[in-house]
C-alpha cells in the first residue's frame, strides 16, 4: 500500500535580512527523508527551533519546499491539478501549536466548525451540517454539543479548544492529522485525555497521526510500539521503533536527549551517567557546515564529521545519520 505522505530528499531554505541590502540564507530542513503509512502514529521529537513545525507545514502543503519532493499516496503534490490538490488538503490536516490563535476569536464554535464543511461540500444542507457538527462534537467528547457550540474561543478552556481543533480537523474525513505540540499549552492533568482522544480516533477511524513534541514521555505514550523520528537542527538524525530507540538510543544526540530526562527516584538518578556531550552551547541552524550538525556537541566526533556529508545508515524501518555509528557505545538509562 502507498504511504500517505512521503518526503524525499527535502530541503527548506529561509532567508533573513542582515543589513540594508543583504540577505542571509539558511537551511531549516536539510536532506529530510520521511514517510507516514496509513493508520500509523509517528512521533517527531526535537529541541525548540529544530524545524518540527516547518516539517508539519511541509507535510500539510502549507509551505513549499525549496528542493525535494512531497508525495501524497505516491504522487507528487506539486504536480496536482486544483481538484487533486484540494483533495490532498482535505486528507491531510494540521492542528496548530496554539489553540487560541488557531480559532477565529469573533466566530462561535459552531461557525468555526461550519466553515470548512461549507467550503468543501457546497451541496450540504443546513440540517445535514448541524447533524455532522453534533456528530463531530460527540467524537471529540464535547457533550452536550449545544453547550459549547454557542460559545466563543475565549469562553473555553485550553483542553476544550484543542478538542474543537480536533473536531475541525476531523470534519473533512482526513487520512492524516499533523498535531503540532497539541498538549504543550494545557494542564498536565488534561494532557492524558487529549492523548487518549488521539489514540481513540486513530483506532476507531484509522487516521494516521504525526505527533510533534519535545516531550519524550508523551511521545512514548502515544506512539506506543510505533515509530519515532528524532530531529536535530533540521535533520532527522535517528528514526525507528520508539521502544527500541528509548531503550537503546544509537545516535549521540538521542543519547543526550534521553539522559536529560529527569529521574524522580534519587537513588536511581545517582546511577545516571554523565550526559555524553561536549558542550552545552546551543548550536545554530543559521551556522551549519556541510558535515554533521551535531559535530560541535558530539563526544565521538572525528575531524571529518565537520565537513563530510553524513551517510544515512538504514536498517529496515530504522535509520541513523552518523559517520561513526558503530563506534558510539551503548548507552543505558539507569533503572
Ligand atoms: N517564515 C520563516 N522565515 C524565516 N525563518 C523561519 C520561518 N519560520 C521558521 N523559521 C526559523 O526556522 C527555524 C525552525 O522553526 P520551527 O518553527 O520549525 O521550529 P520548531 O522545532 O517547531 O520549534 P518549537 O519547538 O519552538 O515550536 C527557527 O530557527 C525559526 O526561527
Ligand atoms: Mg513548533
Image: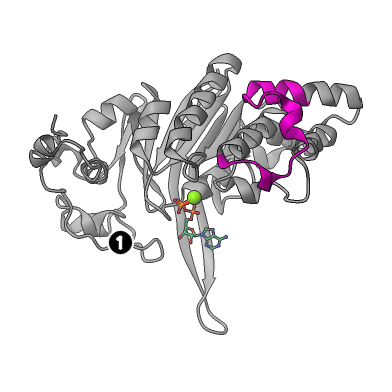
Residue 198 spot, x, y in % from top left: 53, 26
Q: Magenta includes 151?
A: yes
Q: Give me the residue at 21% from left, 37% from top.
A: 264
Color style of the picture:
one colour
Residue 225, how many percent across, how many down? 36, 21
Q: Secondary structure at mark 1?
A: loop
Q: Is residue 164 visible?
A: yes
Q: Nearer the viewer, residue 127 or 283?
A: 127
- Up-down relation of residue 169 to residue 53 (above or below): above
Indicate yes or no whether the magenta region holds residue 98: no
> Relative to residue 237, is residue 149 drawn left or right?
right
Q: How many numbered marks are there?
A: 1
**Residue at x 81% of width, y 21% of height:** 131
For residue 60, what is the image quadrant?
Answer: top right
Q: Which residue is mark 1?
A: 282
Chief SS of the magenta region:
helix
Point out the stretch of residues depicted in magenta. 133-158
Which of these two is toward me, 313 or 48? Answer: 48
With 16 as the anchor, is 230 left or right in this view? left
Image coordinates for residue 73, horizontal then vertical, percent: 61, 27
Quadrant in the picture for residue 214:
top left
- Note whether 170 is above or below 185 in the view shown: above
Q: Quadrant of the N terminus?
A: top right
**Which of 105/277 is in front?**
105
Instruction: Tell me: 55 left or right of 116.
Output: left
Q: Residues within 10 Å of mark 1 (few under 14, many from 20)?
A: few
Amino acid at each position: 500500500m502507498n504511504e500517505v505522505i512521503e518526503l524525499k530528499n527535502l530541503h527548506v531554505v529561509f532567508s533573513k535580512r542582515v543589513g540594508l541590502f543583504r540577505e542571509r540564507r539558511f537551511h531549516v530542513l536539510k536532506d529530510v527523508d520521511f514517510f507516514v503509512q496509513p493508520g500509523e502514529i509517528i512521533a517527531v521529537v526535537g529541541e525548540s527551533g529544530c524545524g518540527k513545525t516547518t516539517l508539519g507545514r511541509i507535510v500539510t502543503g502549507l509551505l513549499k519546499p525549496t528542493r525535494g519532493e512531497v508525495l501524497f499516496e505516491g504522487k507528487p503534490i506539486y504536480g496536482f491539478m486544483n481538484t487533486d490538490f484540494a483533495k490532498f488538503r482535505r486528507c491531510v490536516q494540521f492542528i496548530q501549536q496554539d489553540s487560541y490563535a488557531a480559532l477565529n476569536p469573533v466566530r462561535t464554535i459552531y461557525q468555526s466548525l461550519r466553515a470548512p464543511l461549507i467550503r468543501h461540500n457546497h451541496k450540504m444542507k443546513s440540517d445535514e451540517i448541524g447533524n455532522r457538527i453534533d456528530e463531530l462534537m460527540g467524537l471529540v467528547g464535547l457533550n452536550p454539543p449545544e453547550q459549547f457550540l454557542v460559545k466563543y474561543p475565549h469562553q473555553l478552556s485550553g483542553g476544550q479548544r484543542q478538542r474543537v481543533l480536533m473536531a475541525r480537523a476531523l470534519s473533512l474525513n482526513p487520512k492524516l492529522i499533523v498535531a503540532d505540540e497539541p498538549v504543550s499549552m494545557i494542564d498536565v492533568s488534561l494532557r492524558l485525555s487529549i492523548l487518549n482522544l488521539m489514540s481513540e480516533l486513530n483506532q476507531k477511524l484509522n487516521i494516521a497521526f504525526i505527533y510533534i513534541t519535545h516531550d519524550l514521555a508523551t511521545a512514548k505514550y502515544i506512539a506506543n510500539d510505533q515509530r519515532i523520528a528524532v530531529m536535530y537542527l533540521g535533520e532527522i538524525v535517528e528514526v525507528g521503533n520508539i521502544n527500541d530507540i528509548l531503550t537503546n538510543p544509537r545516535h549521540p544526540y538521542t543519547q543526550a536527549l534521553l539522559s536529560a530526562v529527569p529521574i524522580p527516584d534519587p537513588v536511581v538518578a545517582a546511577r545516571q551517567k554523565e550526559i555524553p556531550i561536549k558542550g552545552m552551547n546551543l548550536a545554530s541552524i543559521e551556522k551549519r557546515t556541510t558535515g554533521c550538525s551535531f559535530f560541535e556537541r558530539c563526544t565521538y566526533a572525528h575531524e571529518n564529521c565537520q565537513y563530510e556529508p553524513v551517510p544515512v545508515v538504514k536498517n529496515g524501518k530504522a535509520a541513523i545519520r552518523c559517520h561513526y555509528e558503530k563506534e558510539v557505545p551503548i548507552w543505558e538509562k539507569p533503572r
